[in-house]
Image (spheres, rainbow, N blue to C red):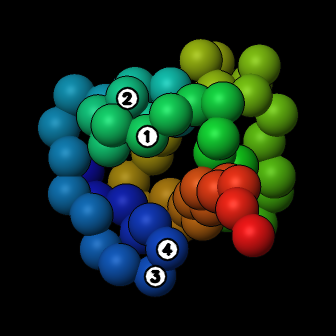
Amino acid sequence: MELRINGQNYFHQGLPTITALIEALSLPDRAVLVELNGVALRRDEWPAQALKPGDSLEIIRIVAGG
């Protein structure tokens, strides 16, 4: 399946949900914001949000610092 993540094409197999994608990308879920097809998702929506071919995601990692 092909997705678009942060403007780049991304191919995957077997990643049915946002939660599975975040885990596959080795991102810390507590420090990530996800927008799917222009809609910001709450973290509690990730496990039920199925990914479909052609979905467009923006994934933003929050980093503390000064």
Task: Bin the neighbour count of mark 2 within 10 Å (Cα to Cα): few under 14, some 14-19, many 20 and up.
Answer: few
Q: CA distance from mark 1 to mark 3?
A: 18 Å
Find numbered disc 3 in the image and state the secondary structure of the residue it sits on. Answer: loop
Check disc 3: other Cα within 10 Å, few if <14, some if 14-19, many if 20+. Answer: few
Q: Which residue is mark 4?
A: 6
Q: Earlier in the sequence, mark 2 or mark 3?
A: 3
**On the rendered image, what quadrant is the C terminus found in?**
bottom right
- Earlier sequence position, callout 1 versus callout 3: 3
Mark 3 highlights which residue?
7
Q: Which labelled disc corresponds to residue 23?
A: 2
Of discs 2 and 3, which sits in the foreground?
2
Q: Which residue is mark 1?
A: 27
Per the model, the C-alpha gap separating discs 2 and 3 is 20 Å
Which residue is at 20% across, 57% downward? Answer: 11
Q: For numbered disc 4, what is the local secondary structure?
A: loop
Q: Is residue 2 left or right of residue 57?
A: left
Visible residue check, residue 19 = yes
> Could you tell me how far apart the alpha carbons at marks 1 and 2 are, in whole angstroms?
6 Å
Foreground mark, 1 or 3, reads 1
Of marks 4 and 2, which one's residue comes earlier in the chain? 4
